[in-house]
Image (tube, coloured by chain):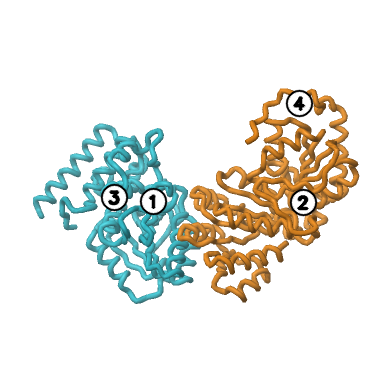
Chain colours: A cyan, B orange
């Protein structure tokens, strides 16, 4: 991974923002946010057409976080876009705050309401279908969790997307191998996500979901493909990626930061940022 | 009533290019006409109702005007959470048609019976509910639903039992339609298939009045209060659970603003036991002519024991909201 400090949507800056939000709000769900940081960073930086740049811009590409538990990662990007203020983030999870702990369509820039799993993909499929029907050129990117793939509607939506040849739909599976109560393979064996997606008619790529360059290339390749099939990226990720003591550790789906763990996490991130800056 | 639905659907689809019909592989023969006239406005999403509701939400967000068609046992019951989160939370303009409500699919059993759709949806904020009694109410229901630009569920129950209105009828959101007026004794309020039953039962009670309630949510509270004040007792009739449906809605308003005797005739807290025709199941649940008469007799007898409670003097001092 080549890190360039001070560029937009820098993963380490986004992780820092997530940590600050989680600490201020005394919330969990840090690990599911960390596993999609590079995915949302790459999408917002280089792939999403944001139209006039406002969250409700007509003609925008849609980004749907179907696994709503990672919402802090998206909030962090929306802060960089100026769609949310630092004050908004500081008040995350607090009484009377607009920002809830799961994705919520009442917030401009968040397209669907999730938290209950298996909703966002169907809505995204509907948006993609409408865009195709009306030839608006809009694309729809949906981030789905591998744990979320326990849900039946995900597979209904895959069938629908394949049947209707929704080539403007890109499903990105956050394949971190963990769900709320354990390993995906132990809770409800999923097997090869890529094989399943191909069987459902998707043009599918498998990449390291924390490698921004690889994500970039996969997204570009899929976009350029002359194919009437829907697109999918299986992003191999690590829940809690970026902080050593959160790495692949499901406790950080739930655990709140203490002053000590907050300091340790921030120190580790700052150290990485400095060494990245020294290298560049 | 299904013909009225189909005709209204085609008319609306011809007038508004945003309209799109979605079905979860239901409605055999019902959509022949729209498929012939407007083939690209018909979308069979397959036997996948949860996805269908999400897709409809996406279509509505993108500016289209989807109409969902399914059996009421599936929309809203199977997909209640999708309706809540994907449609109602954002108050999207989606019209949902639930066909075959009540015991229409008599012999098919519990999977196809639906006597809980009204109560299930009533608690979801922003959901509107229409329950037409005949083709005329259905035609108006479609007009109301499409002009609302918000989530609306239209409940279609038994639809081949004849019209209760002589011709086209206009009613507004929440309005109860006075089918015939009475002298302030018994008042019958019914919805859907039970309006015809109420009209028949009313013939046994001189001076009774009958109201049809095609709009169950919203319900015009002012009108309900006036009806409760002006009758000695109200009897509600619905082919739906006595919990959470029309009777409950009337009782909720009455108990706060204009207490009066209310007897709720509907489906008791149980499933149908046996296979059988529609008529058989209506009788099993006491909703056929004899069953309704028996229940009304019992209720009237009970009121006789406590007639003071419905005297005018008992009703003074009740808080009623200011009329606007």
Cα separation between marks 2 and 1: 47 Å
Which residue carries the number 4 mark? B315
Question: Same chain, marks 2 and 4?
Answer: yes
Cα separation between marks 2 and 4: 42 Å
Give the mark, 2 or 4, whose residue is nearer the N terminus.
Answer: 2
Q: Secondary structure at mark 2?
A: loop
Cα separation between marks 4 and 3: 61 Å
Cα separation between marks 3 and 2: 57 Å
Mark 2 or 4: in front is 4
Cα separation between marks 1 and 3: 11 Å
Label drawn at residue A77: 3
The N terminus of chain B - image quarter: bottom right
Q: Tell me the subunit letter for badge 2.
A: B
Which residue carries the number 1 mark? A110
- The image shows residue A254 at horizontal and vertical percentages of 37, 40
- The image shows residue A35 at horizontal and vertical percentages of 31, 51
């Amino acid at each position: 991974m080549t890190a360039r400090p001070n560029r937009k949507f820098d993963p380490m800056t986004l992780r820092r923002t997530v940590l600050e939000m989680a600490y201020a709000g005394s919330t969990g769900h840090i690990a599911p946010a960390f596993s999609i940081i590079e995915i949302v960073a790459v999408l917002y930086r280089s792939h999403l057409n944001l139209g006039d740049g406002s969250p409700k811009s007509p003609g925008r590409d849609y980004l749907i976080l179907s696994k709503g538990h990672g919402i802090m990662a998206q909030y962090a990007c929306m802060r960089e876009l100026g769609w949310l203020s630092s004050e908004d983030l500081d008040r995350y999870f607090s009484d009377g705050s607009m920002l809830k702990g799961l994705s919520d369509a009442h917030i401009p820039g968040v397209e669907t309401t999730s938290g209950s799993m298996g909703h966002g993909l169907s809505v995204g499929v509907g948006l993609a279908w409408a865009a195709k029907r009306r030839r608006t050129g809009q694309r729809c990117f949906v981030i789905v969790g591998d744990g979320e793939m326990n849900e039946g509607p995900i597979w209904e939506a895959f069938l629908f997307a394949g049947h209707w040849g929704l080539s403007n739909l890109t499903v990105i599976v956050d394949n971190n191998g963990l769900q709320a109560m354990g390993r995906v393979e132990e809770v409800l064996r999923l097997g090869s996500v890529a094989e399943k997606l191909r069987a459902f008619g998707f043009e599918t790529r498998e990449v390291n979901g924390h490698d921004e360059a690889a994500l970039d290339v996969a997204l570009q390749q899929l976009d350029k493909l002359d194919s009437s099939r829907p697109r999918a990226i299986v992003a191999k990720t690590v829940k809690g990626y970026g902080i050593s003591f959160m790495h692949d550790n499901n406790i950080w789906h739930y655990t709140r930061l203490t002053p000590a763990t907050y300091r340790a996490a921030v120190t580790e991130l700052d150290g990485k940022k400095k060494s990245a800056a020294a290298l560049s | 009533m299904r013909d009225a639905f189909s005709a209204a659907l085609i008319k609306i689809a011809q007038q508004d290019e945003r309209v799109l019909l979605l079905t979860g592989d239901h409605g055999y023969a019902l959509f022949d006409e729209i498929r012939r006239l407007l083939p690209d406005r018909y979308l069979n999403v397959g036997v996948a109702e949860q996805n269908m509701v999400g897709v409809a939400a996406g279509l509505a967000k993108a500016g289209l005007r989807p109409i969902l068609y399914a059996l009421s046992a599936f929309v809203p019951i199977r997909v209640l959470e999708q309706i809540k989160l994907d449609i109602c939370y954002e108050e999207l303009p989606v019209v949902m048609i639930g066909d075959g409500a009540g015991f229409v699919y008599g012999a098919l059993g519990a999977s196809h019976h639906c006597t809980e759709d009204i109560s299930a949806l009533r608690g979801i904020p922003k959901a509107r509910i229409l329950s037409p009694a005949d083709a005329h109410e259905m035609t108006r229901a479609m007009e109301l639903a499409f002009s609302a630009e918000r989530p609306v569920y239209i409940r279609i129950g038994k639809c081949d039992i004849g019209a209760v209105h002589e011709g086209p009828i206009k009613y507004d959101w929440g309005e109860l339609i006075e089918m015939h007026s009475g002298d302030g004794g018994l008042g019958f309020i019914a919805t859907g298939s039970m309006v015809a039953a109420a009209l028949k039962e009313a013939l046994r009670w001189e001076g009774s009045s009958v109201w049809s309630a095609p709009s169950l949510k919203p319900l015009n509270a002012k009108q309900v209060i006036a009806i409760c004040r002006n009758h000695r007792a109200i009897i509600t009739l619905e082919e739906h659970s006595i919990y959470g449906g029309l009777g409950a809605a009337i009782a909720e308003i009455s108990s706060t603003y204009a207490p009066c005797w209310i007897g709720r005739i509907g489906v008791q807290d149980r499933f149908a036991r046996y296979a059988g025709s529609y008529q058989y199941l209506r009788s099993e649940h006491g909703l056929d002519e004899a069953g309704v008469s028996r229940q009304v007799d019992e209720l009237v007898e009970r009121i006789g024991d406590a007639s003071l409670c419905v005297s005018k003097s008992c009703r003074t001092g009740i808080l009623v909201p200011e009329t606007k």
